[in-house]
Amino acid sequence: MGIRSIKELDLKSKRVLIRVDFNVPLDEEGNITDDSRIREALPTIQYAMDQGGRIVLMSHLGRPKGKVVKSMSLLPVARRLSELLGTSVNMAPDCVGDEVKKMVDQLAPGEVLLLENLRFHIGEEKNDPQFAQQLSELGDCYVNDAFATAHRAHASNVGICEHIKESAAGFLMLREVEYINKALKEPKRPFAAVIGGAKVSGKLEVLENLVDKVDKVIIGGGMAFTFIKALGQSTGKSLVEDDLVDTARTIMEKARARGVKFYLPVDCVCAPEPKSGQGAVTATVQEIPPDLMGLDIGPATTSLFSEALSDCNMIVWNGPMGVFEQDAFAQGTLDITKKIANSKALTIVGGGDTDAALHKSNLTDKIDFVSTAGGAFLEMLGGAELPGVKALER
Ligand code: AMP
């Protein structure tokens, strides 16, 4: 792997500009409901502080789409980070500009400044060279520790590398890239991919690539219904992305041609809608009532998937098997979580919802590797070169 580690940089008295992923969930009052993403970045930040660096942190939060949205300010993150580091963290009013530059220049070794939300500027997501240049002026060296955004080419993770002299990966980024690369290079077989969740778009391309690498594909969640429709079956009111039905069919044909076992649900828990949890019935997939939608895998599917996983020596998993946030539709996800956690296989799990399902069942410790990323994790598994990682290689 051609990326440098933060350990290879001389940080003493340098302005160390670190891209972190502080995109934490906030409640309506602006309280952080889960600070894992801040905690994950602590080793890199602490290391840079211990080396006598002058630390400048930058992140996005939510989707403000180039406008200042007060509820998406990183101020609550600065407060939480101060508590976790046990030192005060200053908050800049913006992420570029003269005032911010002045605050950066005044930092003493070991001090930390957090820049305001990068996505308050339209140039961030557009990877605008001028915005990247402005960001680069805030550091003598650059460290990227935001693996979860590495599948996007934005100014703070890709454009900036064109403008700054020295760049390297932080510990979190290195851990993720090294682990996933190693697993893909020498997969233990049989190797299964378990994919769920609601969004079919974005995941189909990955699946197409994964079919080349795995021995078994197991599809659950809302995703499954686009595949079930592609088999010519009716799906009631279940989530289906009609324009992707043909692609789903092509993927199944590809899997068949390669001898990859492809598993879809055979029964599901159905209801009129996902929110209330009322009126749930279990039906075989061939007999989903026309006025109901499939919202969880049923018990026969859980048995089928469990059986298919039982001889596997490597399992990667992304996406819940049903609307697990609602108790009435959580059982399938919880059962598959248990199966994967207790499996003898090397287990690699990624994605926010999947992580939440693991927490819900208290089984996180039984997974070999939990990625902090969803999209980046999936794309890397599919063999894609992530722009945020590639930029560090230059
Ligand atoms: P994704 O972001 O694509 O991983 O989707 C995660 C979301 O998929 C979760 O919030 C689940 O509630 C939702 N989901 C899972 N299964 C279904 C289903 N059968 N129908 C609708 N939504 C689902």
Image: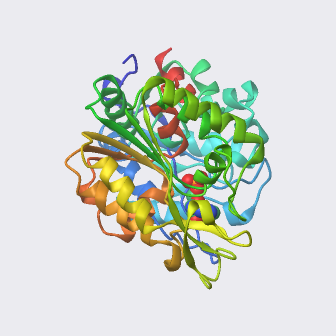
Q: Quadrant of ligand 1?
A: bottom right
Instruction: Give the total number of marks visible in the rendering.
Output: 0
Q: Residue at x 54, y 76 (%)?
A: 326
Residue at 60% x, 74% y is 27
From the viewer's side, name the closer residue of 249 and 17.
Answer: 249
Q: Where is residue 130 shown, x and y percent of the image?
A: 75, 27
Q: Is residue 86 at all visible to an observer of this figure?
A: no
Check the picture and name the quadrant holding the N terminus: top left
Residue drawn where x is 39% and y is 61% of the image = 302
- Is any part of residue 43 visible from this angle? yes
Q: Position of residue 40 (x, y in %)?
A: 38, 51
Vertical placement of 294 versus 55: above or below? Answer: below
Which residue is found at the position 54% from the left and 59% from the top? 24
Q: Is residue 234 left or right of residue 282?
A: right
Find the residue positioned furthest to the left.
344
Place of residue 26 in the rendered image (x, y in percent of width and height, measured from the top left): 58, 68
